[in-house]
Image (cartoon, rainbow, N blue to C red):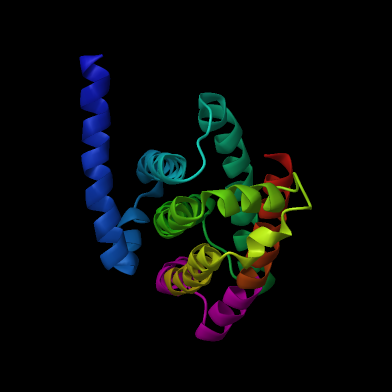
Amino acid sequence: MDFLQKYLLLNLSKYVVEFLDLLCHPKKFLALKNGNPDEELDRALIFMGLSFAIGVALNGALTTQITWTEFLFVRPVWFLLYIVILAAALRFSWLCVGACAPFLGFLVTFLYYMGVLTVMVCAVLAPLEAIFKHFDPTGYGKFIDLIHFRSAQHRDALSSPWLAAPISGILLVNIMELAWTVAVWGAYRKLTDASRLRSFLAFVIFSFLERIVTVIFVFFFLILF
């Protein structure tokens, strides 16, 4: 038990340092990680895993309570499927413009990119959703039932003034996601050694595919869970 606690504390301390370094200097940080992707893959996987755990913990603590089964199995599997398909979409976007790079370099960069993005999304949406839940618990409950397709008779929840909080959060998250993708995109361009035009075209393709994949996954998540 002592060993496990020390291991978790060590990885958490490394995680915080890496998170701040990546957030402040994304291109420089990822260039260093891609210098030896074989050795950095394990660290990137740990970073992604901790980011996911933090995101789920934030969401569970501030908004909807989830079971241990959902925390340990259902959501990780669903999220893993999402990032695998998203990674494939990213790879496909670059292949469409005739650019390619070693798979491990792409994977390490993508894991760090998604790790920060996951925390950013949950850190914004969870508190704003919690505001709606706190000030209008009845409307919040009806809204959750409505968006999870449990009841079509709770449309009156859409008239709650506190619904503006999560909606503004969604808009803010989209802006942050775009800004973060732009900030990290240079690391992919360096990996592929592509021209600015090819890089821009790959960015457009990926942005389009990412929207489609995310909407589909959110839709089925709301239906199934």
Q: Nearer the viewer, residue 208 or 216?
A: 216
Taking the image as shown, residue 205 lies to the left or right of residue 200, namely: right
Dominant SS of magenta comes to: helix
The C terminus, quarter of image: top right
Give the residue displayed 33% in from the left and 54% down from the top: 33
Q: Quadrant of residue 81?
A: top right
Question: Does the magenta portion include 190?
Answer: yes
Q: Position of residue 67 (x, y in %)?
A: 53, 28
Taking the image as shown, residue 155 lies to the left or right of residue 120, namely: right
The N terminus, quarter of image: top left
Q: Quadrant of residue 159?
A: bottom right
Q: Position of residue 38 (x, y in %)?
A: 40, 43
Answer yes or no: is residue 164 visible.
yes
Q: Position of residue 161 (x, y in %)?
A: 54, 68
Q: Nearer the viewer, residue 162 or 23?
A: 162
Taking the image as shown, residue 16 lies to the left or right of residue 75, namely: left
From this viewpoint, which residue is outermost toward the bottom?
A: 197
- Extent of the magenta region: 182-205
Taking the image as shown, residue 13 lies to the left or right of residue 217, namely: left
Give the residue displayed 60% in from the left and 32% down from the top: 74
From this viewpoint, which residue is outermost toward the right?
A: 152
- In this figure, what is the number of numbered marks? 0
Question: Does the magenta portion include 197?
Answer: yes
Q: Is residue 155 above or below residue 204?
A: above
Q: Nearer the viewer, residue 90 or 16?
A: 16
Q: Nearer the viewer, residue 105 or 219?
A: 219
Give the residue displayed 61% in from the left and 71% down from the top: 207
